[in-house]
Image (tube, grey):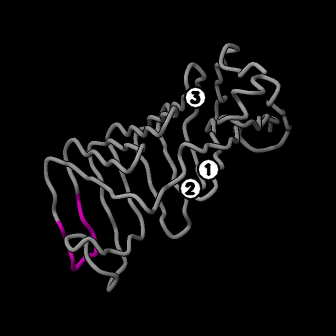
Amino acid sequence: MSVTTASFFKISASLAIAGVGALIIVSGASAQATSSKMKGLELSNDKPIQIESDKLEIKDPESKAIFTGNVKVVQGTTTLQAGNMVVFYKSGGGSVSSGDADIDRIEVSQKVFLSSGTQQATADTGSFDMTKQVFVLKGDKVVLSEGKNVFVGCQLNVQMETGEAQLEACGGRVQIQLDPQSRKKN
């Protein structure tokens, strides 16, 4: 059994200020992971949501709506794009067609792209647990970037209320490319 490392860092404003100095390395017996504060990926519940897709199928008896083909979701400065999106809503909690559905979770697949402010993430699949306020992006290569700073792993977990994030390597190593020019000068 080998011991791997976990790197903890802040990637939003703190990364721009502190750069490489924000990295703290901690040894542990789990897979390599990187944690971060991602202010740009927090949700905003007070802004309207626009959804576009090639097809929409609402299955009220199953409490789900299936969006297929070129799905694009926009809320404020946040954009989510994927090939497919399934919205699961709580039974008896309204319906998607009336706009008052109580959403339980959302699953996206087929080339997921998430952009918010200066931060972007790409993955193969994603799931958003609205009850726990957690979203997870997974793939052979999950890429998170902010400007010229790039972080690569295979699973990104984000607490939507706080913006706290963790990037996991899933057996390999997390890769980080930092641009020293991204640091703010005092």
* Residues at marks 3 and 2, CA–CA distance in whole angstroms: 20 Å
Mark 3 is on which residue type? Val
Counting from the top left corner in percent of width and height, residue 14 is at 73, 34
Q: Secondary structure at mark 2?
A: loop
| Residue drawn at the location 19% of the way across and 48% of the way down | 53
Mark 2 is on which residue type? Met
Label 2 crowd bin: few (<14), some (14–19), many (20+), radius 10 Å: many
Q: As rendered, which of 74 and 55 lies closer to the eye? A: 74
| Residue drawn at the location 40% of the way across and 48% of the way down | 76
Disc on the earlier residue, 3 or 2: 3
Quadrant of the frame with the C terminus? top right
- Would residue 88 be found to the left or right of residue 25 on screen? left
Q: Are marks 1 and 2 in contact (CB under 8 Å)?
A: yes
Task: Name the mark nearer the viewer: 1 or 3.
Answer: 1
**Which label number is shown at residue 151?**
none
Label 1 crowd bin: few (<14), some (14–19), many (20+), radius 10 Å: some
Q: State the residue lying farthest toward the front.
A: 186
> What residue is pinned by disc 2?
160
| Residue drawn at the location 31% of the way across and 42% of the way down | 82
User: Looking at the picture, does residue 185 appear above or below residue 44?
Assistant: above
* Residues at marks 1 and 3, CA–CA distance in whole angstroms: 18 Å
User: Looking at the picture, does residue 132 appear above or below residue 116?
Assistant: below
Q: Are marks 3 and 2 in contact (CB under 8 Å)?
A: no
Q: Tell me which segment is drawn in magenta.
A: 58-66
> What residue is pinned by disc 3?
152
> What residue is pinned by disc 1?
163
Task: Name the mark nearer the viewer: 3 or 2.
Answer: 2
